[in-house]
Image (spheres, grey):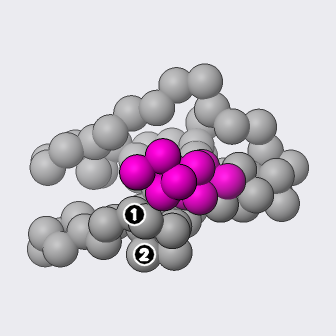
Amino acid sequence: MIEKLSNASRFIKQKADGKGLNLPELALTLGSGLGNFAEKTVKLLEIPYGDIPGFPVSSVHGHKGKLILAT
């Protein structure tokens, strides 16, 4: 489990570093009905869950299934 978390964390950090971004100090997990909140942000980086090692892919219709770094 720790190895999966480390791999996912490393992957996300590499993607952020590649864009010259710092990792966020705050994270929000948006549930059903709140996904449109992400549309009101300035997206700096979007990573599909399926690209992140060990992340489950969203199977719920209408869910975007993305990790978004935004301001």
Classify mark 1: residues with Cα within 10 Å, few (<14), some (14-19) or many (20+): some
In front: 68, or 43?
Answer: 68
Label 2 and label 1: CA atoms lie apart by 7 Å
Sequence-wise first label, 2 or 1: 2
Q: Which mark is residue 15?
A: none
Residue 45 seen in this snapshot: no
Residue at 32 percent across and 39 percent down: it is: 29
Q: Which dot marks residue 55?
A: 1
Position of 2 with respect to 64 (left or right) is right
Amino acid at pointer 2: Gly
Residue nearest the observer in this picture, 42 or 59:
59
Residue 18 visible (yes or no): yes
What residue is pinned by disc 2?
A: 50
What residue is rendered at 30% in x and 71% in y?
Answer: 57
Residues in magenta, as a range: 1-10
Mark 2, Cα crowd under 10 Å, few <14 / some 14-19 / many 20+, is few
Q: Is residue 26 left or right of residue 39?
A: right
- The reply to whether callout 2 and callout 1 are in contact (CB within 8 Å) is yes
Q: Is residue 33 left or right of residue 2?
A: left
Quarter holding residue 21: top right
Query: Measuring 58% from the left and 43% from the top, which residue is drawn there?
Result: 70
